[in-house]
């Protein structure tokens, strides 16, 4: 019998670490949302497929969300596994378990399910738009800073918006800070995506994904990432001061802390640089300590940078 947590572990080390921190029912909603977004992202990244095939897969997947228990789900899943030229075993397994994931998604409470569907379809549609711009060789080149931000919105900003609505669902005490969170939600997603793009830029370029425009100074991207991470920090601290559950605060704090550390590392050592396992666990331990002691879970950026 497939297991959602096992699929999560096989497709994302970071989210497998942070999603279990969430309280229910948000944990289950976010688990399924991540897996659905991961399926869409797999089609977007399938550069060895012709762009028409990638677009068709994204459109078919989006349509299946409307009827997640139909027999067509199994047929499409089998085709994707057989045809997708992909080496990542975890992603292939996830595609093969698409019927199971969609069946579990269909069991979500109505409001949560509708939020997940809306935003997954939005990102799938946006991804198809960027795939349509790829050349016959599968290469995508972004043009300028705004184009980069538009791409980050499609693949990550929408995620930030969806997560915010799921956090606010059935949490009346957070209603007072809802506008503050919504204002920063897309920047939160953009921050994490920019850090990943800067970290993975050399590998992505070899795969035909030229996310960093050739004429865009890298220092501008680093500066934008810092500004966005400051917004993500404000978002997380607002949740903490607003009385959100510790698990909800920790879920947001951990990726922000890791992103700050990774950004510094990449700026110092260049693309491909990663924080060490010891540094990772040190960050986790400090986060747990701050939560237990009631201290702010993230230092202000200026202090952290020093």
Image (cartoon, rainbow, N blue to C red):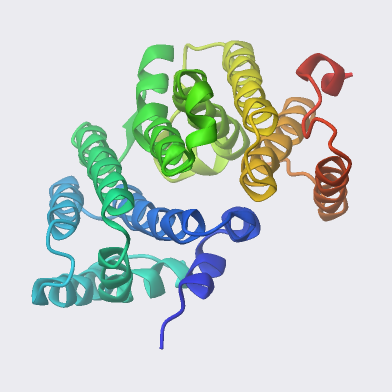
Residue 253: quarter of image: top right
Q: Residue at x 47, y 25 (%)?
A: 178
122 or 108: which is nearer to us?
A: 108
Q: Is the residue 108 above or below the residue 206 in the image?
A: below
- At a point 19% along the width and 46% down the height, the residue shown is 51
One can see residue 223 in this view: yes
Drawn side of residue 98 relative to residue 206, left or right? left
Q: Residue furthest bottom?
A: 1
Q: Taking 143 as reference, is 17 above or below it?
A: below
Residue 137 position in % (x across, y down): 27, 43
* Most foreground residue, 301 or 252: 252
264 to 273, vertically: above or below: above
The quadrant of the rendering that contains the N terminus is: bottom left
Q: Quadrant of the C terminus?
A: top right
Q: Is residue 143 visible?
A: no
Label tally: 0
Direction from residue 215 to residue 116 in the image, left or right = left
Residue 258 picture location, percent across and down: 72, 40
Which x, y percent locates residue 89? 46, 73
Q: Is residue 241 above or below residue 227?
A: below
Residue that lies at the very extreme toward the front in this rendered image? 172
Q: Is residue 8 left or right of residue 258?
A: left
77 or 52: nearer the viewer? 77
Q: Residue 161 occupies which quadrant of the picture?
A: top left
Q: Position of residue 30 (x, y in %)?
A: 45, 53
Residue at x-position 80% and y-position 49%: 284
Residue 36 vs residue 206: left or right? left
Residue 264, quarter of the rendered image: top right
């Amino acid at each position: 019998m497939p297991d959602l947590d096992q699929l999560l572990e096989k497709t994302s080390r970071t989210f497998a670490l942070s999603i279990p921190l969430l309280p229910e029912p948000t944990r289950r909603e976010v688990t399924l949302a991540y897996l659905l977004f991961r399926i869409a992202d797999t089609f977007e990244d399938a550069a060895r497929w012709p762009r028409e095939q990638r677009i068709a897969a994204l459109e078919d997947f989006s349509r299946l969300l409307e009827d997640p228990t139909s027999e067509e789900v199994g047929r499409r899943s089998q085709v994707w596994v057989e045809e997708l030229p992909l080496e990542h075993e975890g992603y292939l397994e996830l595609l093969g378990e698409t019927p199971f994931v969609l069946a579990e998604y269909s069991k979500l409470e109505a409001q949560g399910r509708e939020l997940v569907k809306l935003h997954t379809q939005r990102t799938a549609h946006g991804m198809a738009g960027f795939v349509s711009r790829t050349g016959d060789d599968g290469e995508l080149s972004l043009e300028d800073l705004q184009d980069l931000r538009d791409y980050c919105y499609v693949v990550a900003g929408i995620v930030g918006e969806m997560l915010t609505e799921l956090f606010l669902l059935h949490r009346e005490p957070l209603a007072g800070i809802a506008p503050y969170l919504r204002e920063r939600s897309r920047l939160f997603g953009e921050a994490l995506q920019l850090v990943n793009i800067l970290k993975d830029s050399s590998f992505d370029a070899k795969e035909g994904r030229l996310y960093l425009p050739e004429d865009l100074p890298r220092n501008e991207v680093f500066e934008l990432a810092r500004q966005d991470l400051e917004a993500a920090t404000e978002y997380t601290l607002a949740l903490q001061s607003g009385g959100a559950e510790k698990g909800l605060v920790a879920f947001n704090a951990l990726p922000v802390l890791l992103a700050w550390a990774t950004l510094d590392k990449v700026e110092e050592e260049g693309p491909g640089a990663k924080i060490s396992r010891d540094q990772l666990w040190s960050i986790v331990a400090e986060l747990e300590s701050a939560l237990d002691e009631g201290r702010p879970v993230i230092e202000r950026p200026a202090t952290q940078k020093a």
